[in-house]
Amino acid sequence: MARHKLTASLFALKKIPKETIKQHMMEDQLILEIKLQAYLNHPNILKLYTFFADEKNIYLVLEYMEEGTLFEHLKRRKDRMT
């Protein structure tokens, strides 16, 4: 989670190590994900606001969801069904 200093808005900040991207040869996949998410506008898909990088990581700034990750949401839902 990250908070914008001027507006106090909350965002999800996804950090992806560049070394991991290289190890798994995911450069093209990451570029495609960024391009696709930049153009998507759907209520069931998190909005990608921007991205940036430093020497070691790439960061995606995404819409923040208080419910947590999709995995966490599905796990809670599965637990309630059993």
Image (cartoon, rainbow, N blue to C red):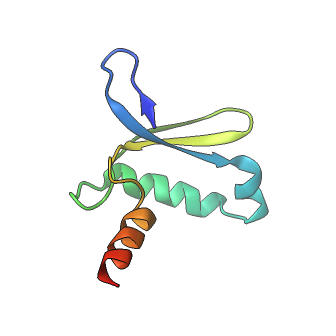
User: What residue sits 38% from the left and 76% below the top?
Assistant: 79
User: What residue sits 70% from the left and 57% below the top?
Assistant: 21
| Quadrant hosting residue 63 | top left
Q: State which quarter of the image contains the C terminus.
A: bottom left
Give the mark count: 0
Q: Residue furthest bottom?
A: 82
| Location of residue 50 in the rendering, given as x and y in whole percent from the top left corner | 43, 38
Near-viewer residue (41 or 11): 11
User: What residue sits 45% from the left and 67% below the top?
Assistant: 71
Near-viewer residue (40 or 80): 80
Q: Is residue 13 above or below residue 42?
A: above
Q: On the picture, is 2 further left or further right than 58?
A: left
| Quadrant hosting residue 73 | bottom left
| Location of residue 36 in the rendering, given as x and y in whole percent from the top left corner | 40, 58
Q: On the picture, is 47 further left or further right than 20?
A: left
| Location of residue 8 in the rendering, given as x and y in whole percent from the top left corner | 33, 22
Q: In this view, does 77 lie above or below 73?
A: below
Near-viewer residue (40 or 9): 9
Q: Residue furthest top?
A: 6
| Location of residue 49 in the rendering, given as x and y in whole percent from the top left corner | 37, 39
User: What residue sits 61% from the left and 61% below the top?
Assistant: 28
